[in-house]
Amino acid sequence: MNFRPPLFSDLGEEFAGAFGNVDAQFTIAGVLLPRVRAILRQWRELDLGEEQGQAVEGTTHLLSVAADMVPGLVSQRDSVTIFALDAEGFPTGISTTFEIKNHSDDARAMVRIYLSGDI
């Protein structure tokens, strides 16, 4: 049963096509899927650690992809290879593979995927 309204299913690929800044190729349950356009965001966070108020800094990497492009995605089992794009949207030849740390699917157009590792 698909809980995603048809309107959102159609919008996912449109968002990725318009705002995508990377190509992504997922390996889901050991099967390599075709490349898809995705939106990669990253930000640095600074917080205080619990012991002695030590500053702790980390980077969060969030990948958004059309939900219909990653059927069966499972956190901490699957992986994704991210291919960098140049200013015109063409692959640069630079790629890195990451494990899927966690993902969130709220039945809207895009799935939000948190990556393990540093880019």
Image (cartoon, rainbow, N blue to C red):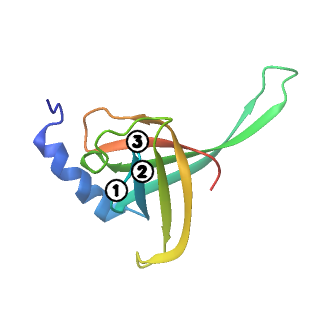
- Residue with the mark numbered 3: 112
Q: Could you tell me which secondary element the residue under label 1 belongs to?
A: loop
x and y percent of residue 7 in the render?
13, 45
Q: Is residue 83 left or right of residue 51?
A: left
Task: Return the disc, 1 or 3, that comes first in the chain's sequence.
Answer: 1
- Residue with the mark numbered 2: 27
x and y percent of residue 9 in the render?
18, 46
Task: Return the disc, 2 or 1, that comes first in the chain's sequence.
Answer: 2
Screen quadrant of the N terminus: top left
x and y percent of residue 68 in the render?
24, 47
Q: Is residue 107 left or right of residue 5?
A: right
How far apart are the two marked residues, 2 and 3, measured between alpha carbons? 16 Å
x and y percent of residue 58 in the render?
69, 41
* Three-letter code for the amino acid on which mark 3 is drawn: Arg
In which image quadrant can residue 94 be found? bottom right
Res. 86 in view: no
Q: Do the residues labelled 1 and 3 touch (CB within 8 Å)?
A: no
Give the residue drawn at x 35%, y 62%. Answer: 37
Query: Outermost residue toward the left?
Result: 6
Q: Mark 1, mark 3: which one is toward the viewer? A: 1
* Three-letter code for the amino acid on which mark 2 is drawn: Thr
Q: Mark 2, mark 3: which one is toward the viewer? A: 2
Give the residue drawn at x 49%, y 58%. Answer: 81
| Count of marks overlaid on the render | 3
Q: Do the residues labelled 2 and 1 touch (CB within 8 Å)?
A: yes
How far apart are the two marked residues, 2 and 1, measured between alpha carbons? 6 Å
Q: Could you tell me which secondary element the residue under label 2 belongs to?
A: strand
Q: How crowded is mark 2: few (under 14 residues within 10 Å), some or many (20 or more)?
A: some
Rendered view: 32 above or below 52: below
Screen quadrant of the C terminus: bottom right
* Three-letter code for the amino acid on which mark 1 is drawn: Leu
- Residue with the mark numbered 1: 33
